[in-house]
Amino acid sequence: MNMIIYLAQVTGCTAVFYLFYYAFLRKLTFFSINRWYLLSTVILSFLIPLIKIDINEPKPYTGVVEQVVYNYAPQPAEPTVFTLTVDEATISKPVKWQDVLRYTYYIAVAALSVHLLITLLAFFKRLKGKQISKLGNVNILSGNNKVSNGSFLNYIFVNEGELSADEIRQIIAHEMMHVKLYHSADRIIVKLAQIILWFNPFIYLYARSVEENHEFEVDHAVANDTDKQNYANLLLHLSVAGNGILYHNFSKVPLKKRITMLFIKPTTNMKKVIYLLFVPVVLISSLAFASLKKSEKAHNVIDRPQKLKKLELPKVIEDFKKTDYYKRSHAFVDKTIKVKVTDLEFNDGKLDLLKVKYEGYPYQILHFNLPQMPDLKVGDELSIKVQTFIIDFEPKAKGLMEMKISEPLQLKPESIYKGGEMLYSAGKDFKDAAQEPVIDTNKYRQKLSPAGEAAREKEDAYRKSDDFKIKKKSIDEFHKAGEVTVKIKANATDNRGNKGLTFDHAGQEYFIATGRAQQKQLANILKVGDVLKLKSFGETIGKEFKYIEIWPSYIIKDDKKVFELAEAGKIPAYPFLYEANKVRFTDGQLTKITKYANGKWKTAVVETVNGYRFNINFKPDGPDMNSLSDDDHVRLRFVGEKKTGAKTYQVNWVAISDDIKSHGIQEPTLFPKFYVKADNKAAAAKRPLTMKDIYVLKAGSSVKKDKDHIQLYGGVDLKIGEMTITAEHVTIDNKKKLITARGSKDADDSKRIFATLRGKGDTTTIISDSLAFNYQKMGAHVWNSRQGSNNKN
């Protein structure tokens, strides 16, 4: 539990309980009951926020196994360029106020704890060498002028100066009552609560009320055995406030209150009924400050992401793979099987359930939403290509999941044929071609700046080259191989100045960077000649790359795992990403589709694997969406998002597709604003570069001082026009049209990041400690050049 929230809840409880005491109980003469109320409510205040209350029962959870296991990671269709001009916002370095508050709290608690410990040590040290007389188990110290009349634990202090024998007897009787009632224990408990809740004003009011109630309780008991008037005179005679921290001082509580309560008429027993109100106060506090644990509805693959622990669902699936159900279902996923129809069920003229038999086992296919087909009957033989199979999950103790398998198993078909005639394919009704939506077969691309268009043309040209095809085939085979064994061949430096190591595999030379990000640790682990086992997380190839650059998921050396990439296997934390044309995109599952009376979609939700929900509204005359259905995994492109909850957005959709390589179904109004047909390549007009032409390809963090001044830190790669800049720290000054780049300050050159400026096709390359580049005049000034020259181009 978050400590700050917990302490706030405890403070809220103390406030409620103390205000109830102040309003209803403080004037009652039931001092013993008041004592236990004050003490118990302090303890309850710490316990109530720890209570967890379940407010509803979990519902069954259904998921598509293949999609849960294999399709949760985003798969960008093409390189994504992040630009400073997206909403003209950058990431600031926020002050972690939560940490500031936490450390301030710890320091105050430590200081108060030390003060209490010193006080106790000083108290017991003062007792050494003193003359002590005993009365039963109680120690009495007399004649000590340094301590006022009072008591603590089983010690009583009496200052005999100017006191008569009768007054001393009354003081001892008073303090003896404190000792017998264990009032010191109350004071210690409240003092500890004060240390923990030092910032809470109500805990100090509690401490004062506990002390006052102790004195009222003892005064009332002692005065019953003596003359009240004489006892009141003694109080008046000793009415000098003490300064005890833990012990009971005979005259510390205000004299007027004590004398008033001494002579007040006792409260009638009928008023004890007021204490029954304590029960609803506790219940209200529990509801207000306890942790309300709402069991989350679990109805599809990604509805309960925070409950699906990293290894939990894979473990369930591994157990499932050992069963006969797995052999009967997974064996024909993505294959075509011949089945026999055993039953058909219709709903409103639509085929809702199709039951079939395959190799003697029953299967069923739900929710076809197909029109009734007179030529389809029990006994017919069908050919079905199976897309996936479906099993159920149910929540069990502590948020884990268990599998619930029921007969017959459910299949999700990709296509259905009867006698060579296609009856069904991916949600389309081929029996009713008149209603089939018109699908735009054009391919589209993002609208980009002139610099972006030039970079795209360069990339497209490279993709057609033999070099790309050979390297692409190599990395596909590398991935397919999984874990491979390699031998480090040599130390090397890539075209961008990054240091690393190379190895050969299947006729290609691969490069592992050892001078940036998490891979810096490899510089001290690996050396030439090492034999390694590794698995690739990702690769980079390009015309300007000398090697195939690899990011290893993990590396094993001498049968010991020496490296594991932090990003490997992680579910992303972000809700969506940006395309260069400012369109947002995310990958997820379609759910909760509702329709208008005319059959067009009205609303739908796209849910991502990390728990975000994107709510979409459709127009009654919008495009036909029947090629998509519930549970389809799609890429959603959108703009104008509005956050409506912690993980919920309302968005304006631009395009939805079940294939990340296409734009699928397009919103007629918004789509043309952000995309043009790929064969319409407008020539980029030459113009002076501006801040809008600066694209940040990589940065650890950034600070936007104002609209014209931005600072980037932590290994920066940016592109402006046909120039690229790499550095440890970059400052952009739009007023002066100046980009200042500075390298890192490592003493070891092999670990340094230099300020590097490259022109188109590497015709100009400048490597230096720092440089300044004027993007309007296209000129650079260099300090402590390491390579290249101060060219203007």
Image (cartoon, rainbow, N blue to C red):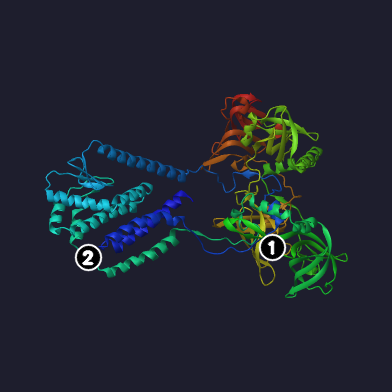
Q: Secondary structure at mark 2?
A: loop
Instruction: Residue lying at the far right in this picture: please name it.
Output: 419
Q: State the residue position of label 1.
A: 630
Helix, strand or loop for disc 1: loop
Residue 123 x/y as whole percent: 28, 40
Label 1 or label 2, whichever lies nearer to me, is 2
Quarter where residue 748 is shown: top right
Residue 109 at what x, y percent from top left?
Answer: 38, 43
Give the quarter of the image for residue 161.
Answer: top left
Residue at image location 30% in from the left, 40% down from the top: 119
Rate crowding at label 2 as few (under 14), some (14 to 19) or many (20 or more) other CA atoms within 10 Å: few
In this rendering, the answer to whether 405 lies above or below 377 is: above
Marks 1 and 2, the one that precedes in the sequence: 2
In the picture of the structure, the residue carrying the numbered disc 2 is: 266
Residue type, label 2 = Pro
541, 104: nearer the viewer:
104
Marks 1 and 2 close (CB-CB < 8 Å): no
Q: Nearer the viewer, residue 33 or 547?
A: 33
